[in-house]
Amino acid sequence: VQRSLNIGVVLFIVSEVFFFVSIFWAYFHSALSPTVELGSQWPAPGVEPLNAFEIPLLNTALLLTSASSLTYAHHALINGNRKSCLIGFIATLALAVIFTGFQALEYIEAPFTISDGAFGSTFFFSTGFHGIHVIIGTIFLTVALTRIISYQLTDH
């Protein structure tokens, strides 16, 4: 049974990788070979992209930091350090909520919409699905934190 569960997890992760590769493929296909319909340039004329050094860079830093705090929490759990584990989990959840808030702000302030051709479509599709993954992960981490608080998840 355990082997089947492991194979299932691996197949799920592989399917997620292929899903996001296809999204990136759509973006890069449109960006690297813009068609006449796009004005033969990327993004299309009249579409102003976001500055990558503002909210997108901040969100990247938040995600990398949250990965570090979750790794810290995981190692603390394995080593039986409950207090450090709780701190790591709470920090990770806080960073995830902040990320989601900035993602919403980015959507509100974006100077383009999903209907602005291939650029708007691929932007909102890719960041939207990534945001959904972050929200689902936040829910999973909240459940795990609740189990740690109630001593249902320990190093044993």
Image: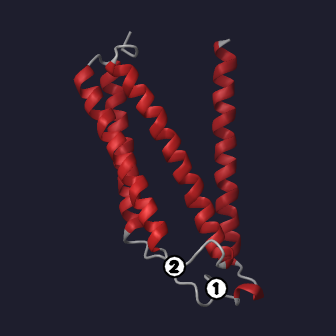
Tell me the residue that label 2 is attached to. 49
Q: Is residue 147 left or right of residue 122?
A: left
Task: Look at the numbered disc 1 and give the secondary structure of its residue.
Answer: loop
Q: Given the current orientation, which residue lies at the most extreme top position?
A: 156
Q: Amino acid at mark 1?
A: Ala
Residue projecting furthest to the right: 36
Q: Which quadrant of the rendered structure holds the C terminus?
A: top left
Q: Is residue 134 visible?
A: yes
- Residue at screen point 52% across, 41% down: 136
Residue 68 visible in the shown view: no
Q: Earlier in the sequence, mark 1 or mark 2?
A: 1
Question: Which mark identifies residue 103?
Answer: none
Q: Is residue 56 above or below residue 116?
A: above
- Would you call the spot at circle 2 few (<14 residues within 10 Å), some (14-19), or many (20 or more)? some
Q: At 39% from the left edge and 46% from the top edge, which residue is drawn?
A: 96
Which quadrant is home to the N terminus?
top right
Q: Which residue occupies the extreme left position in the image?
A: 83
How many residues crowd around disc 1 within 10 Å: few (fewer than 14), some, or many (20 or more)? many
Where is residue 79 drawn, in percent x and y? 30, 18
Secondary structure, mark 2, is loop
Q: Is residue 90 left or right of residue 60?
A: left
Residue 115: which quarter of the image?
Answer: bottom right
Q: Residue 66, image x and y in percent?
A: 36, 44
Q: How many marks?
A: 2
| Residue 92 sits above or below residue 62 on the image | above
For the point 46% across and 69% down, the residue is 108
Kind of residue sitting beneath label 2: Pro
Look at the picture and state if 153 lies above or below 134: above
Determine whether label 1 and label 2 are within 8 Å by CB: no
Residue on which disc 1 sits: 44
Measured Cα–Cα span from mark 1 to mark 2: 10 Å
Find residue 126 and report its horizontal and vertical position in percent.
60, 60
